[in-house]
Amino acid sequence: MHSALRRSMRFSHATAMVVGIILGASIFIQSSEITRLVPSTAAVMLAWLAAGALTFCGALVCAELTSAFPQTGGVYVFLRQIFSPALGFLWGWAMFWSIHSGIIAAIAVILARYVAYFVPMGEPAVRAVAIAAILFLSAINYLGVKPGSLVQVVLTAIKLAAILLMVALFFSLGGAAHRALPVEIPVEHISAGAYGLAVAAGLFAFGGWHMVTYAAGETHDPERTIPRALLAGTLIVTACYMLLNAGYHYVLPLDEVARSRYVAADAMQRILGAGAGGAIATLVVISAVGSLNGIILAGPRVYYAMAEDGLAFRWMGAVHPRRQTPYLAIAAQAVWSSVLVAITSYRKLFTRVVYTEWLFFALLAAGLFLLRRSPDYKPRFLTRGYPLVPALFIVASLGIVIDQCMVDPRSSFMFLGLLLLGLPVYFVWSRRAPKEAAANVHH
């Protein structure tokens, strides 16, 4: 269990990982979800801006925690060190069974939906393509972090260039489409619950911003590199999302955005004709591949760290002697994500992920207050924004969780039950390997 992971990632790779993971295919789907919830252009843009601001606050929190705990495992390590190994275990437990694997499954489904743009297929075939994508990209990441991060840089550069081109085309060629739009009828009332769900749907499109912290043990100078990558990446993505959504609503009527399954393709077709849809579908597939690649790369590092602490199967901490990757953890993640694709709907996947994930994010921000109370702790990053940033982040995170519980209490409490089921598992597991877990926790 003493095999080390190789430090191969630098600032460009880490930033590409942040941007590439977030800037996936969700932006080409979630715009419709949000517009259905808040049928007003101004409210839609405000929901996206709120999601971006919340994500940036979370990035500030994670940047501070990474500078304090620059170890492989990220959020798992933060929770373990600040609160207890039990809470760190619950994060890893939720990651594997719901959060991380759910994100992989949801994005793979989006990828497959856009493949179906070229080759019409039914729902079983869509799910089969999604599973094939997960297995293929898992195989690439088995080959090593360097091939995986190089693929990430290339795909991220392609996505950013294509998005900037799209935005330029919307506003340079979309004048006629914009003038033909019907007058938008003001909405009399949008409930707080609907608006909360809209922000939560936007947050799913920002999902994965924290995942670069999982690979701290494979990053050069992680105390500086990862915080800088977190902030640069979230700002880049927020700008892209705001511009893209402004472009969609510039050329498409509100009701068409709300009911569209391929909103980016429909918007481009409106200004360039039918041939543009295929180009956009190709971009979405590339975006989904880039996002999936980064997410598949990140997750197994947490399971590796848990195995090192004796809180997961020992084989999940196995490092390939030549590839130097946690190859068995990569395989386990691929199998379970594929199962989720086969048995769960897309909407249930993203709702479950947001609800569970942001519960833990609130705890991370609360952990900053505990750290600052220690006389030995010296803030290294979040100096001017404390205590406002973590306080606002806690309130917003809990608001998202409470809103989800009120709107869909049955599913919310079911997911909470799955999370709490991890506690008895932790107590059994920690007794199996108490010496190993304690030694690594204090390492």
Image (spheres, rainbow, N blue to C red):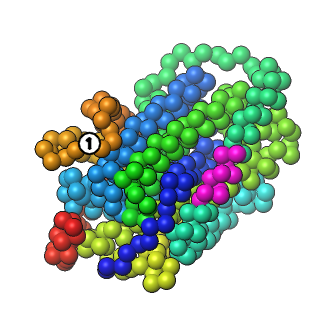
Q: Is residue 262 visible?
A: no
Q: Give the quarter of the figure containing the N terminus.
A: bottom left
* Residue situated in front as seen by the camera: 299 or 26: 299
Question: Could you say whether the residue bearing mark 1 is in a helix, strand or loop?
Answer: loop
Measured as percent of width and height from the top left, residue 215 is found at 42, 61
Tell which of 428 and 16 is nearer to you. Answer: 16
Q: Inspect the magenta stretch and tell me whether residue 357 lies in it.
A: no
Left or right placement of residue 95 versus residue 255 in this view: left
Binning the other alpha carbons within 10 Å of mark 1 as few (below 14), some (14 to 19) or many (20 upward) gives some
Residue pictured at 38% horizontal, 64% vertical: 217
Rendered-image quadrant of the C terminus? bottom left
Q: Is residue 437 left or right of residue 75?
A: left
Q: Is residue 149 above or below residue 3?
A: above
By secondary structure, the bulk of the magenta-drawn segment is best described as helix
Q: Which residue is mark 1?
A: 379
Quadrant in which residue 386 is drawn: top left
Point 86% across, 39% down: residue = 273
Q: Is residue 133 left or right of residue 67?
A: right
**Which of the 4 image quarters holds residue 98?**
bottom left
* Along the viewing direction, whichever of 409 and 87 lies nearer the viewer: 87
- Which residue is drawn at the image coordinates 30% and 35% (left, top)? 383
> In the current view of this chain or complex, which residue is farthest to the bottom?
321
In front: 120, or 429? 429
Residue found 50% across the figure and 79% down from its top: 323
Q: Amino acid at mark 1?
A: Pro
* Range drawn in magenta: 152-161
